[in-house]
Amino acid sequence: MRVVVLAVGSPRDRGRHLVRLIREYEDRASRYFRLEAVEVPAATGLGGSPPTARRREAEHLRHRVPSGLDTWALTREGEELGSRDLARALADMATYGHPGVAFLIGGAYGLDEDLVRDCNRRLALSRMTLPHDLARLVLTEQLYRAGTILRGEPYHKGG
């Protein structure tokens, strides 16, 4: 199954530790899914208001979503899934012949409301606000974990 992580901006980790961790989990998750990470330009710093930046970023995200994939917006107002629930949701998509999912991660100002409304699903990694780089790390680790759960591998130790 195809899984695309669409993120606004590139990780801005000066020490490169966070970038290495993100890449590590993307590599691990790609053992289980046809994983693709796509970064679109951030619109912050171009002048204008936060709503204008969100709209610009939404346009970039929309253009990069592969045809036929479900879109899941990462937003703290979304549905909270446990690791096994996420694995089950991805397995159900594969079982029923669905081509895959694109996870959308917003930039500094979050995701545009219209874009979120148009998504098939809204997913919360936490009710807390997370920096988008950290959200990307958590998501990719959870995708790796979902793959290990689905294959019965020992990485996931939760109930």
Image: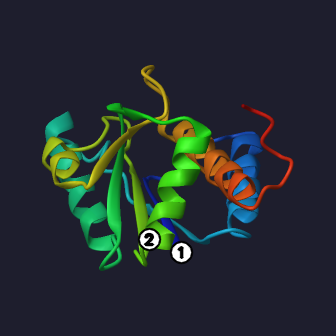
Compared with 128, 32 (above or below) is below
Lower sequence index among marks 2 and 1: 1
**Residue 124 placement: quadrant:** top left
Residue that label 2 marks: 100
Determine the secondary structure under disc 2.
strand
Compared with 51, 153 (above or below) is below
Query: How far is disc 2 from disc 1 in space, using C-alphas?
Result: 5 Å
Between 21 and 123, the one nearer to me in the picture: 123
Residue 10 in view of the camera:
no
Give the percent coordinates (x, y) of residue 92. 47, 62
Residue 7 in the figure: left or right of residue 53: right
Residue 78 in the figure: left or right of residue 1: left
Contact flag, marks 2 and 1 (Cβ < 8 Å): yes
Between 9 and 62, the one nearer to me in the picture: 62
Residue at the image position 58 percent from the left and 52 percent from the top:
87
Give the percent coordinates (x, y) of residue 109. 30, 35
Disc 2 residue crowd, few under 14, some 14–19, many 20+, Cα 10 Å: many
Give the percent coordinates (x, y) of residue 49. 16, 35
At label 1, which amino acid type do we have? Met
Image disc number at residue 1: 1
Residue at the image position 74 percent from the left and 64 percent from the top:
27
**From this viewpoint, which residue is outermost toward the right?**
154
Image disc number at residue 131: none
Residue 141 in view of the camera:
yes
Between 69 and 86, the one nearer to me in the picture: 86
Residue at the image position 77 percent from the left and 56 percent from the top:
24
Determine the secondary structure under disc 1.
loop
Residue 136 in the figure: left or right of residue 48: right
Give the percent coordinates (x, y) of residue 23. 71, 57
- Quadrant location, the C terminus: top right
At label 2, which amino acid type do we have? Gly
